[in-house]
Amino acid sequence: MRVLVTGGSGYVGSHAVRELVAAGHEVIIYDNLSTGNRKLSDGFELIEGDIADGEKLAPALDRVDAVMHFAACAYVGESVANPRKYFKNNVESALKLMDAVLKSKVRKFIFSSTNSIYGIPQVLPITEDSPKDPINPYGATKLFFEHVLQAYSASHGLRYAALRYFNAAGAHASGLIGEVHDPETHLIPLVFKAVLGKIPPLKVFGHDLPTPDGTCIRDYIHVSDLGEAHVKALEYLANGGESVSLNLGTGKGTSVKEIMDSFERLTGIPVPHELAPPRAGDPPALFANATKAKEVLGWTAKRDLDEILTSAWKWQQRLEAANYQL
Ligand code: UDP
């Protein structure tokens, strides 16, 4: 199949693009490069455009069988400080993308959703049916768009897969692409930056939480496993599968302390850190029940935490050697 990948120059999108091609599909990347990086699209057709630009989208949509939509603003903290940016990009512009899709013949749509739609769960692990009560504008915009897909699916014959990622982490096995965020707020790259002396010691947000070692628990999933799930979701829809929403996680929680300990075990380098109060709005523990994705797509995460840390560390060292210029 040929797929239009919005946000294909971003972190998760660029990995999904590689998995699509590895599975024999063709890709057209559509990205405005506002947060994406041109280098992550090297070797692929890239249309530079905004998802709100229906005129630019129309000829591209005429050439594809499906859309994967990654293009979005994705910083929780920024969404709290600047919610207008989030509602504008992730809702208003995304609605324009949907208008362009519905004007085209494309009826298969794969959406990057997030565990942030669940807010603070009352029960763990989180299933797809857990209450959806986002605690930040980022999660609210993603949940809103899931409702859009649900409605358009009922009224316009669209079929979609909303893929709710837990904590995307790791880098491509080639060492050629990986996570580059500016500013960086995610734990694993910050562990590396602390080790490399680029930032002061890592602040461990929360240390006397109601978790086994007192630090926060998350479900870290390798970005290439996410990419593979997107390919399976595409093939599921192509085979006539009904619209579906799925958690993409490993089902296993890992604490901040376990991340630091694993890094030290793998590299021999201790992580400079200091204990700090919990970050506002951070639930103590989040992890997925990942069984529905296995039942529906036949997909499970193949890569473990060691592979996440090793691949991401390789990528970080490449960035460091290149002085953070891709
Ligand atoms: N975290 C931390 N120190 C940091 C950044 C993150 O202790 O400098 C913790 C954070 O509280 C959370 C986990 O690491 O429990 C993962 O945070 P991240 O921002 O990577 O992802 P989130 O789960 O917030 O989407």
Image: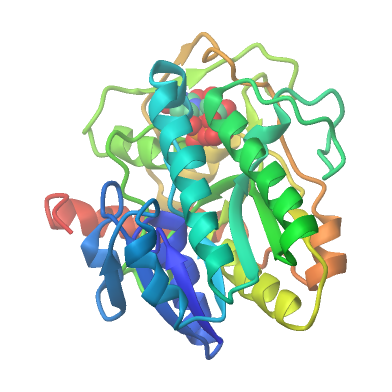
**Residue at screen point 39% across, 75% down:** 60
Q: Residue at x 73, y 75 (%)?
A: 237
Q: Nearer the viewer, residue 222 or 155?
A: 155
Q: Is residue 268 above or below residue 256?
A: below
Q: Is residue 252 above or below residue 286?
A: below
Instruction: Report the side of 241 relative to 30 (left or right).
Output: right
Residue found at the far top of this picture: 277
Colour style of the rendered protein structure: rainbow
Residue 43, percent from left and from top: 27, 81
- Taking the image as shown, residue 87 lies to the left or right of residue 162, namely left
Quadrant into which the N terminus falls: bottom right
Residue at the spot 56% in from the left edge and 81% down from the top edge: 65
Choose between 317 and 94: the one closer to the eye: 94
153 relative to 291 in the view: left or right: left
Q: Is residue 19 visible?
A: yes
Q: Residue 66, relative to residue 243: is it above or below?
A: below
Q: Where is residue 295 shown, x and y percent of the image?
A: 87, 67
**Viewport quadrant of the C terminus:** bottom left
Please say whether residue 170 is visible from this viewpoint: no
Tell me residue 187's x, y (percent).
Answer: 46, 35
